[in-house]
Each structure stands twice: as C-alpha cells, then as structure tokens.
Image (cartoon, grey):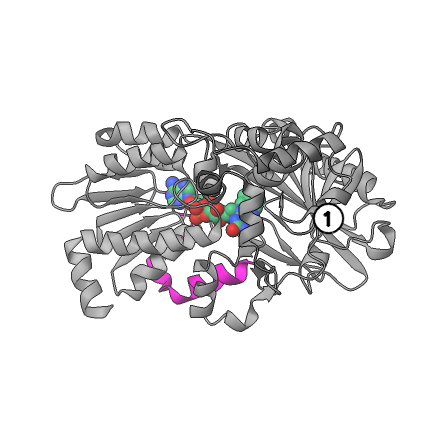
Amino acid sequence: MERVDVCVVGGGIAGLSAAYELHRLGVAFRLFEATDHLGGVILTESLDGFTIDGGPDALLAQKPAAIELCRELGLGDRLQPTLEPRTAYILKQGRLHPLPEASVLGIPTRLAPFARTGLFSAWAKLRFGLDLALPPCRLPPSGDESIGAFFRRRFGPEAVDYLAEPLLATIHAGDVDRLSMRALFPRLLEAEQAGGSLIQTFRRRRTPAPPDGMFRSLPGGLAELTAALVATLPTERVSRNARVETVDQGADAPFIVRTADSVCSASAVILAAPAPVAAGLLGPRNERLAALCREIPHASTATVALTYPRDAVTHPLRGSGFVVPRVEPDVSIIAATWVSSKWPGRAPADQVLLRAFIGGARDPEVLDRTPDDTALTQLAHTDLARILGIAVAPSLARVYRWMGRSPQHEVGHLDRLDAIERRLEETPGLFLTGSSFRSVGIPDCVRDGRATARRAVERTPGAAAAGESEG
Ligand SMILES: Cc1cc2nc3c(=O)[nH]c(=O)nc-3n(C[C@H](O)[C@H](O)[C@H](O)COP(=O)(O)OP(=O)(O)OC[C@H]3O[C@@H](n4cnc5c(N)ncnc54)[C@H](O)[C@@H]3O)c2cc1C
C-alpha cells in the first residue's frame, strides 16, 4: 500500500491548488481525479480557429488569489482584460437594454443614466428612490436572507425581476428567492447595516471603474491556468481516471483511500469534490457530517457554444453579453456571452463565437428533458437567432453539460458550514474544500484550496515536519 502525508480527492481547481501548495511545501501527496480531465469544470477547446471555454471564462480581479497564482506560474504577462465596451445587457420584452452605467452590482450610483434607462418603469424608478429613506432592516438572528427578499424590500419588485434575479442569481445558476445574501453578497448586507441607503453608501464610496475592467482571462482560455498548475506537479503523484470509492479510517494510518485499483494510506485527506460526492465518501463514523454535506443543493447547467459568420448577425454585439430575466416569456436560455466581443483572439476575424447558458435552478429539468445535444443546440440557436437577428444556422456547435456542478449557497449556507466545521473537528486530518463549501468562483477555490493544504500540513505531524524542512 502506498503511504503519503496528504491525499487530495478531486482534480478541479480547488484540488489542484491544494496539491500545488502541498508540493511547494515539500509534502508527500497523491491526487486522485475521477475522470481523465484535470481542471474540473475548467475546460477549454481549440477548434477551427476558435478558443472555446466550456465552463468558466473569467477571473474576477477584485479577488486576487487566482491572478496571483497565474503570476506565480509565469502566466502574469499573458493575463488579458476584457475588450471594450464592457456593457452587459438585460433582455426586456424582446429588446436588449444596457445595464445603466455607474452601477454597483446593478445598484445605481448616478441619477442620469438610471433615469434614462428603459429597463424600469417610472414607478420602479421612484421605488428605487425609497432606498434613500429606508432605515436598515432588523435581520433574523441568522443575519441572513435571500437575494430576492433583500432587493424587494430595499428597491421594490421590479429590481428583483430585472436586476437581482437575472444578474445576481443567474451567475450562480440559482433561485433568487433561495440564494443567500450573507454567503454571496455580504458587502451589500454590511453596507445596509452600516448606513441604511445602499445608493448613498455606494455614491459616497464611488471609485472610478478600473481602466482594465473587472475580469481577466488567458489567451488559451482558462485551461491555460490548470495546465500550468498540473505542469508543476510530479506526474507520478497525480492519478487520472481514479475515482475514489471509499475513505476509511485505519488503525495505524488515520485514512485509507481506495479507488478501483489502488489503496493509499494518508495522515490527512482533503476532499475537493462536490459536496454530494464528499458525503458519499464519508464513512459511518461521519454520518452527521455527510448529512450536512448532502443538504447543500447543486444545480445543473449546460453551456452551448455557437459560431456564426460575423456578417450573418444583425446585432452589433458591442458588449459582453446579456442575461434573461425569468419573467421574460418564451426564452429557454438564461444568459449569453458574446465571447468574441468580450475577449481578444477567440474567433477568426470574420466569425463570432457566442455562448448560451441553459438550465440552473430556474429550469432544473431542461437538461434531462433534452438529452440530445442537437436539440439543446437548437434551443440555444433559436433564442439567439431571434434576439440577435441571426439568419443562418451555426457553423460550429459544442455542448458542455455540467450536471450537479453549480453549488447553491442558499439562505443558511454559512451556518451549515459552521456546523460542518464543528463536525470536522471530531475527525482530525479530514478537510473539505471547493466550491460547494466556502468558495464562490475560481479565486476563492484557489485561495481556500491552498489554505486548506497549509492547514492539513499544520495538523499532520509527519507532513508538518516535511513542510518545515522544505517549505
Ligand atoms: C458553466 C460555469 C461557468 C462558470 N463561470 C465562472 C467564471 O467565469 N469565473 C469564476 O470564477 N467561476 C465560474 N464558475 C464557478 C467555478 O468554475 C467553480 O467555482 C470552480 O471551478 C469549482 O472548482 P472545484 O475544484 O471546487 O470543483 P470542480 O471543478 O467541480 O472539480 C471537482 C473535481 O472532483 C472530481 N471528482 C468527483 N468525484 C470524485 C471522486 N469520487 N474521486 C476523485 N475525483 C472526483 C471531479 O471529476 C472534478 O474534476 C463557473 C461554473 C460553471 C459550472
């Protein structure tokens, strides 16, 4: 049986970041990944001159962990900002309306662009203004509420329908009336508690938009990051097509990790797989912990990448894309990115690359109802053709299905995580990381994956000695 200090289960960005940190500290580790693909939902394909991200495509610069990691890996010079204009659009009654300029998470900080927008009725604009007079609300003892509840009471119902739901819930593939403010947008809750009016607070704090925008990517797509991470790891320490089936606790070595054809003993185990998988791996000794992990819902989405000749698209595509409010009838997609307008070099000059998103908490059954990729492509194409004025069939289509890969950080998520952490205390050497838990997006997964690796080393005597001598 192989013996290592730390075993990492899952080769998504969280598991790879943990393994990278362990290797940097000189700790003996093994990483098991169930599939033959390292990177999890980060996946980029190069086809016919197009660079297509099947999953995530952007790193939020405000949370620096992923960008710092790129720099550490020698990718600093390759980081690229989004192209201008960076306008995002919202669909209303079949028309695309630009999100008013100078807004913070959709909340207006300047009157003129907000007064001009056709996105809201006159009544809704007045109702936004009530925010200036409303005192902070007394939150329930949990200190949490849904995104929908928060926006409804501060800005009124249209702010939920045309702002909070399509913008803030859709990026998490979630239900606006279930997703947690405290877990996902704590800054807004804090701003309200500190000053009441969010419009006033954000007007006061207004800093000019960063000249390079808020997001970064790499010319080869985000798989450049995971490929560079993997390249730092010794190949013999990383097992692909190695689905972990059980994690038991043995007598002399605390953990025994089994795949179909290997057994590994480890002083510590980092589970970096989605929470339902982690729940299934936790043995009977950790039944309560497993139950808490099972309580975290996960939604499914698909990304449909479509390409067209530039001159076949009527819309000028001057911006990054659009979101579709759930109140808009007869639209199957929930959002679309104009990839070739958002990032440089993703498509030949005379072509456009678009990505449509389908599913999420809004339509949880659509992917099961549409098992055939051709039918899913047709759904996406029909909507894009109508909204953007496209007269031809796509020249290339790729479908990426992400079943159960969008964790839903719903109201109470942070309390559940506290309960999970208390349970973890009872099993020293066992750690959980990844997007199901404390991480929202890639930068958090990098930060938490690396921090979890350091905690595993501190808590594991053999590994700590290696970390001290080599770190
Ligand atoms: C379509 C989409 C678009 C997104 N866009 C963005 C974006 O633009 N920017 C951003 O910051 N975030 C984005 N996100 C979120 C971000 O991609 C995720 O938060 C992050 O990549 C999750 O990484 P992870 O390592 O936690 O999980 P995953 O990527 O899900 O990796 C988990 C890994 O565990 C493996 N595994 C599962 N079971 C086992 C087992 N039994 N044994 C061994 N291995 C196992 C899986 O095969 C997988 O490789 C997006 C997510 C999706 C789905």
Residue 285 belongs to magenta span: no
Q: Secondary structure at mark 1?
A: helix
Horizontal side, residue 71 vs residue 2: left or right: right
Horizontal side, residue 407 vs residue 47: left or right: left
Depth order, front residue of 201/232: 201
Q: Residue furthest front?
A: 133
Depth order, front residue of 460/10: 460
Residue name at image x 16 percent, y 57 percent: 462
Residue 418 can be seen in this image? yes
Q: Quadrant of residue 393?
A: top right
Q: Which residue is mark 1?
A: 113
Q: Indicate if the residue with disc 1 has its beta carbon within 8 Å of ligand 1.
A: no
Horizontal side, residue 4 vs residue 147: left or right: left
Q: Quadrant of the C terminus?
A: bottom left
Residue 121 can be seen in this image? no
Residue name at image x 47 percent, y 30 percent: 137
Q: Position of residue 401 (x, y in %)?
A: 59, 40
Number of numbered callouts drawn:
1
Residue name at image x 73 percent, y 54 percent: 319
Q: Position of residue 110 (x, y in %)?
A: 66, 49
Q: Which region is colored magenta?
A: 220-243
The amino acid pointed to by label 1 is Pro
Q: Quadrant of residue 415?
A: top left
Q: Position of residue 414 (x, y in %)?
A: 37, 36
Q: Position of residue 71 (x, y in %)?
A: 46, 69
Residue 143 to residue 71: above or below: above
Depth order, front residue of 86/427: 86
Residue 390 to residue 78: above or below: above
Horizontal side, residue 280 vs residue 394: left or right: left
The 10 Å Cα crowd at callout 1, few under 14, some 14 to 19, many 20 or more, is some
Residue 229 belongs to magenta span: yes
